[in-house]
Image (cartoon, helix red, strand yellow):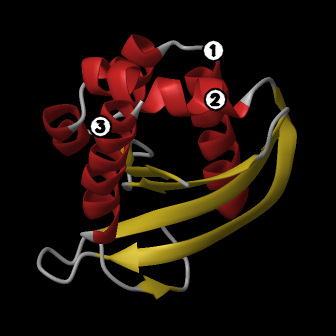
Amino acid sequence: MKKKMIRMMTGMCILAGLLFGCAGSQRLSDNFDEAEVKEAAKNIIVTLNSGEVEALVDEQWNAVMKGAVDSEMLEDQILPIVEELGEFEGFDKEAVTGSKDPDTEQEFAVAVIKAKYEKRKAQFTISFDEDMKVAGFFIK
């Protein structure tokens, strides 16, 4: 059990590092539509809840995320977290903000979605690049 917790925490730290590499919250860029970002984030969560990690990585991850977080890592380290939450019940709160990588000046949309599960709530922070591909993923 302790080993499993260490693996989960390691995975979450890696994903958090990817997300926070896109430093600084700011106003959402005009290159993004807030409703589209929220809907895309919810679709990512629904796909993850269904366990379709290969489809998630193949179809939704951008190239950087594919190189850093593959479907095996999601299956081994993130799916167990989701399974421990229990049955998915719905979405609670949601917010969208912008972010810009200070090195590349690339803009991102960052969605923070709270989801209700049978046993407890979870907060997903998902960042998207301008192609609406996942550029960062964190679950808390």
Where is residue 128? Give x, y as percent: 43, 53
Q: Residue at x 38, y 55 (%)?
A: 130
Which residue lies under the disc numbered 1? 50
Dot 1 lies on which element? loop
- In which quadrant of the rendered image does the C terminus lie? bottom right
Q: Residue at x 68, y 40 (%)?
A: 42
Q: Residue at x 43, y 14 (%)?
A: 55
Where is residue 103? Give x, y as percent: 11, 79
- Find out whether the residues at labels 2 and 3 contact each other: C-beta distance under 8 Å: no
1 or 3: tag closer to the N-terminus: 3
Which residue lies under the disc numbered 3? 7
Type of amino acid under label 2: Glu
Q: Is residue 2 above or below residue 37?
A: above
Type of amino acid under label 3: Arg
Type of amino acid under label 1: Ser
2 or 1: tag closer to the N-terminus: 1
2 or 3: tag closer to the N-terminus: 3
Q: What separation in Å lies between label 2 and label 3 (alpha carbons)? A: 15 Å
Where is residue 85? Give x, y as percent: 70, 34
Disc tally is 3
Q: Residue at x 24, y 75 (%)?
A: 101
